[in-house]
Amino acid sequence: MRIPFIAGNWKMFKTKMEALEFADEFKKLYGDTDVKTAICAPFTALETLVEAFRDTNIGVGAQNVHFEEEGAFTGEISVSMLKEIGVDYCIVGHSERREYFGETDETVNLKLKKLLRDSDIIPILCVGENLAQREAGKEQDIVINQLTADFAGLTHEEAAKVVIAYEPIWAIGTGKTATPEQAEEMCALIRNTVEKLYDEDTCDKVIIQYGGSVKPENATEIMNMDEIDGALVGGASLIPSKFIEIINF
Ligand code: PEP
């Protein structure tokens, strides 16, 4: 039985003070829920959020990490640094990192291995096609290729721990959402690909999220699809009342 998992991705929004204000309001609104929740925040707000959510079951995630243990990598953050703060999750391979910061399937693969082998931090792996690729009917090939490269060398046990977020790039921050049927089709393809790469038991365990302009108005429809176990939410996770509505879909 897979537990629904809804995570927020704040991107480069919110100072420490703003994160604290969010946490105070969010905790007041956060009721009893069977849904797992996390906020993936900028590095500077992580410690504040871990502290603010200490007595709750709200998780905290980073949005990136380096794959080396330490070294001359100016501006980077290591898995040990995240571990020390008490972070639960880490987004890996978000399309904005792939597009603007040179993230490749090779570095994504190294990051997944580092997180899974040297920490209990759960990776949230983002995959998805851009508009041109969808218009050319290549979305399935793109996602299968990403998954195959990103999971290369991971054991069955490691693969089962990865949360996979299907995020069509054309739906991120654009207000355009994939239809529930389009999202379902791609999430089913992802589960099927994990089955082919591993086995049925592994693909049954993997949590698959949809991400791309999820908001209170469309969360129920998306969350009710069979193969969609959760959501990765950008813009709408910045406002406590909106994010709560999505969690209580
Ligand atoms: C995201 O940042 O992963 C995302 C899906 O953003 P938005 O919900 O704003 O489209």
Image (cartoon, helix red, strand yellow):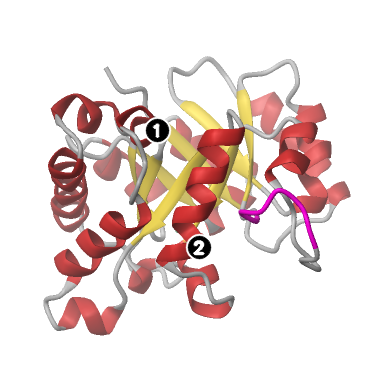
Q: Residue 121 carries which label?
A: none
Q: What stretch is highlighted in magenta?
A: 66-71
Residue 127 drawn at (x, y percent): 35, 59
Residue 200 falls inside the magenta stretch? no
Q: Which residue is drawn at 46% across and 37% down?
A: 6
Q: Name the dominant secondary structure of the magenta segment.
A: loop
**Residue 236 appearing in the image:** yes
Query: Circle 2 is placed at which residue position?
Result: 107
**Residue 24 appearing in the image:** no
Residue 85, by quadrant, is top right
Residue 241 drawn at (x, y percent): 59, 40
Q: In which quarter of the image is the C terminus?
A: top left
Residue 63 lies left or right of residue 157; in this view the side is right
Residue 70 falls inside the magenta stretch? yes
Up-down relation of residue 122 to residue 222 (above or below): above
Q: Which amino acid does label 1 sit on?
A: Glu
Query: Circle 1 is placed at which residue position?
Result: 158
Residue 90, by quadrant, is top right
Outermost residue toward the right in this view = 17
Q: What residue type is labelled 2?
A: Thr
